[in-house]
């Protein structure tokens, strides 16, 4: 009798233990998980699926590679059936002029609206609740071209029991990963039991402060991670210009001229002069950035996507980082391993540099 009870207990613990180990993503940064994502991203080249599978981390298989769409955008879907996990891996800049143009198409547009991709295709989106949330036009255009395909594959594998997904991208792919996560959050019809965890690796800034607030809220408690090499300059762009119109509506700068009028004449003239000297250059610079990186670059985008209609650019350029930061600080030996020679401006941006820091800081056992 005791033997039977022990055997039943053992079998129960064995099988339920395996289920528990396999079923759930957990929040916060996992060095080994991130290492696997870097490995998957490094396979994101024009090799066959068989070649990619041969080099993939254990238990991962690529099940879908998208065609190139938009401005040379591509993504892949990897499945780990032992964990019930899907990984949406978004490719970064691929070195072509068209792919780079997407990065420079940096005029800000509303985080809610509709993009006209071509004469027969529009993309209606919501990326944040706040009407003051703005995002990067180029990366949203790239995501818009991939989004229907992503949804089709998510729905397909959801029906096969894959209910947890990691959204991952390095560089431009990381910027698009922000927007993808936001889009899925607000999309009507998305199954409520899907779990998303996001790693935005070496990613530039995706939008303004109000977009960042929204993203950090929906991914709170460790579900949206931004991984940065402390030597990498790419996460520092696009340029950020803050003007009084970029503040919350209730702020002392909104009615500052009214406050000035309450002062004595000499004080009022002096304060108005100083405020104007500080405010006008910032506002002028913001308008210039929007004109050059929005309207002018749109003309070049139009040559690649002739039926893409110009979106409404907002008068703001206050780009802000988003996501819970994970800083890969340049530890001893890093600068000798990845020296800057004055020309190799992406030496600190490479997957190899990020992987080296990860292995040496977190001792993943890979170095």
Image: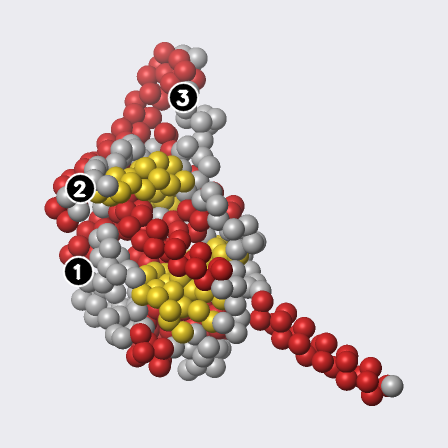
Q: Is residue 37 above or below residue 216?
A: below
Residue 256's label in the rendered image is 3
Mark positioned earlier in the residue sequence (3 or 2): 3
Closer to the camera: disc 3 or disc 2?
Answer: 2
Where does residue 43 sit, x and y in percent of width and height? 32, 73
| C-alpha span from label 3 to label 1 | 47 Å
Q: Quadrant of residue 353?
A: bottom left
Classify mark 3: helix, strand or loop. helix
Q: Residue at x 45, y 79 (%)?
A: 58
Determine the secondary structure under disc 1: loop
Q: Quadrant of residue 152?
A: bottom left
Q: Identify the residue position indicated by label 1 in the image.
A: 96
Residue 107 makes an appearance in the image: no
Q: Position of residue 350 (x, y in %)?
A: 30, 68
Instruction: Tell me the quarter of the picture where residue 90 sits.
Output: bottom left
Q: Residue placed at 44% from the left, 27% from the top?
A: 249
Q: Nearer the viewer, residue 264 or 309?
A: 309
Q: Which residue is tagged 2? A: 307
Q: Which mark is residue 334?
A: none
Measure how far apart labels 2 and 1 are at the Cα level.
21 Å
Structural distance between the alpha carbons of marks 3 and 2: 44 Å
Instruction: Return the residue found at the far bottom.
Output: 3
Q: Is residue 277 left or right of residue 220?
A: left
Q: Is residue 73 visible?
A: yes
């Amino acid at each position: 009798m005791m033997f039977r009870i022990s055997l039943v207990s053992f079998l129960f613990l064995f099988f339920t233990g395996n289920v528990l180990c396999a079923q759930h993503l957990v929040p916060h940064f996992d060095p080994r998980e991130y290492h696997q994502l870097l490995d998957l991203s490094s396979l994101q080249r024009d090799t066959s699926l068989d070649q990619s599978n041969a080099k993939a981390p254990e238990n991962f298989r690529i099940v879908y590679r998208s065609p190139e769409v938009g401005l040379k955008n591509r993504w892949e879907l990897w499945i780990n059936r032992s964990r019930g996990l899907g990984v949406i891996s978004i490719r970064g800049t691929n070195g072509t002029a068209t792919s780079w143009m997407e990065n420079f198409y940096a005029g800000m547009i509303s985080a809610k609206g509709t993009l006209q991709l071509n004469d027969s295709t529009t993309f209606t989106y919501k990326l944040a609740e706040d009407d003051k949330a703005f995002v990067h036009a180029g990366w949203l255009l790239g995501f818009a071209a991939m989004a229907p395909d992503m949804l089709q594959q998510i729905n397909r594998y959801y029906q096969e029991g894959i209910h947890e997904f990691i959204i991952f991208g390095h560089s431009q792919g990381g910027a698009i990963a922000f927007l993808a996560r936001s889009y899925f959050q607000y999309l009507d019809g998305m199954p409520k039991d899907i779990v998303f965890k996001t790693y935005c690796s070496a990613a530039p800034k995706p939008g303004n402060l109000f977009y960042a607030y929204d993203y950090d809220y929906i991914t709170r408690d460790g579900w949206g991670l931004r991984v940065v090499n402390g030597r990498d300059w790419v996460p520092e762009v696009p340029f950020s210009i803050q003007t009084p119109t970029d503040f919350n509506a209730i702020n002392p700068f909104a009615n500052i001229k009214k406050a000035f009028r309450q002062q004595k004449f000499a004080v009022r003239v002096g304060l108005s002069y100083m405020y104007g000297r500080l405010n006008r250059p910032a506002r002028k610079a913001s308008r210039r950035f929007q004109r050059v990186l929005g309207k002018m670059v749109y003309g070049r985008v139009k040559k690649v996507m002739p039926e893409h209609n110009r979106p409404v650019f907002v008068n703001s350029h206050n780009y802000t980082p988003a996501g819970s930061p994970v800083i890969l600080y340049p530890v001893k030996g890093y600068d000798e391993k990845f020296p800057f020679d004055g020309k190799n401006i992406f030496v600190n941006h490479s997957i190899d540099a990020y992987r080296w820091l990860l292995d040496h800081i977190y001792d993943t056992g890979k170095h």
